[in-house]
Image (cartoon, rainbow, N blue to C red):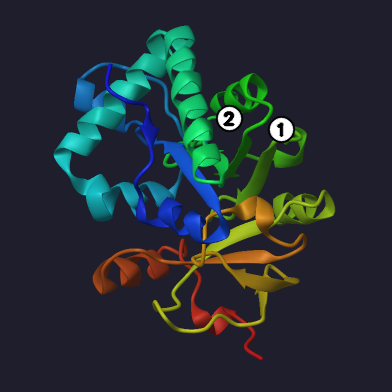
């Protein structure tokens, strides 16, 4: 089996500016693995909705057929032989920790780069208590799944309820949301979603969400063409600048 970890990715590489060497695991989102491997496998994103249309698998190197096949094979291994999958992932992550130490850096892991599997994140965080893990999740009640070394950010989608976001903030968990702010344009200082107004931070500056202040919206710019952005806004998966309170 080829390597499980993704260690070279534009967003993850930004972590080096914070002195952190970050690795992640890229599995197939939703039911992509079933389509590629022509077999029935469970969905890796149980709260997926319109995000399946605008998924990051359609951007950058993720679009390459070879990458799609590789993540499908990883996904199959996760479901077919979880023990082998975790043993290899842990071995690779410990190697990342050693490399980080040699570079006088810290190590971090994002277990779900394109998937949303709580068990995967929990298994890795539990197996390596010295490793800082973090994930975005659309699944409800993320505060029930956080660990000392597993930080979660709630990802707002068209399927999210107001109570989901209220609960997340109440329990010290930030919420991320995709907006149509162009690359390089400044973000507003506050954001309001369904009557909930909070300060904001630019989530594109780095990916280390566990470093974020508590009680903020993490604004993420849409990644894709203008045509795809227009359709994403129409579907209400991407929030428009008009909904954002500028100061």
Callout 2: helix, strand or loop? helix
Q: Position of residue 115 (x, y in %)?
A: 45, 36
> Mark 2 highlights which residue?
121
Kindly identify the residue that appears in the image at 47 percent across and 36 percent down.
Answer: 99
Mark 1 lies on a secondary structure that is loop
Q: Quadrant of the N terminus?
A: top left
**Residue 132 sits in which quadrant?**
top right
> Is residue 214 rendered to the left or right of residue 11?
right
Residue 47 in view, yes or no: no
x, y percent for residue 64: 17, 44
Whether residue 2 is visible to the viewer of this picture, yes or no, is yes
Q: Which residue is mark 1?
A: 145
Front residue of this view, candidates 35 and 8: 8
Nearest the viewer among 227 and 110 is 110
**Residue 225 screen position, x and y as percent:** 26, 69
- Please, which residue is most extreme toward the left here? 65
- Determine which quarter of the picture holds residue 227: bottom left
Asked which quadrant contains residue 199, the reply is bottom right
Mark 1 and mark 2: Cα distance apart in space = 9 Å
Which mark is first along the chain, 2 or 1? Answer: 2
How many residues crowd around disc 2 within 10 Å: few (fewer than 14), some, or many (20 or more)? Answer: many
Q: Could you say which disc has been placed on residue 78 in the image?
A: none
Q: Position of residue 29 (x, y in %)?
A: 38, 37
Q: Are marks 1 and 2 in contact (CB under 8 Å)?
A: yes
- Foreground of the two, 231 or 153: 153
> Quadrant of the image for the C terminus?
bottom right
Give the left or right position of residue 16, taking residue 193 as reference: left
* 29 sits left or right of 136 in the view: left
Answer left or right for 125 relative to 42.
right
């Amino acid at each position: 089996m080829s390597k499980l970890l993704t260690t070279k990715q534009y967003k993850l590489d930004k972590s080096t500016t914070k002195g952190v060497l970050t690795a992640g695991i890229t599995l197939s989102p939703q039911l992509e693995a079933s389509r590629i491997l022509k077999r029935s496998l469970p969905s890796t994103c149980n709260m997926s909705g319109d995000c399946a249309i605008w998924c990051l698998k359609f951007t950058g190197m993720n679009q390459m057929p070879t990458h799609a096949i590789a993540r499908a094979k990883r996904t199959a291994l996760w479901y077919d032989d979880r023990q082998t999958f975790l043993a290899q992932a842990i071995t690779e992550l410990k190697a990342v920790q050693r490399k980080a130490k040699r570079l006088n850096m810290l190590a971090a892991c994002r277990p779900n780069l394109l998937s949303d599997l709580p068990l995967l994140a929990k298994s890795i965080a539990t197996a390596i208590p010295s490793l800082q893990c973090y994930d975005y999740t659309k699944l409800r009640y993320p505060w029930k799944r956080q660990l000392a070394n597993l930080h979660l950010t709630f990802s707002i989608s068209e399927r999210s309820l107001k109570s989901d976001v209220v609960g997340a903030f109440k329990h010290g968990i930030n919420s991320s949301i995709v907006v149509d702010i162009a690359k390089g344009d400044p973000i507003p200082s506050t954001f309001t979603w369904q009557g909930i107004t909070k300060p904001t931070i630019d989530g594109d500056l780095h990916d280390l969400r566990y470093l974020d202040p508590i009680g903020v919206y993490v604004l993420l710019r849409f990644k894709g063409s203008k045509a795809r952005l227009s359709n994403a806004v129409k579907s209400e998966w991407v929030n428009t600048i008009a909904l954002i309170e500028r100061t």
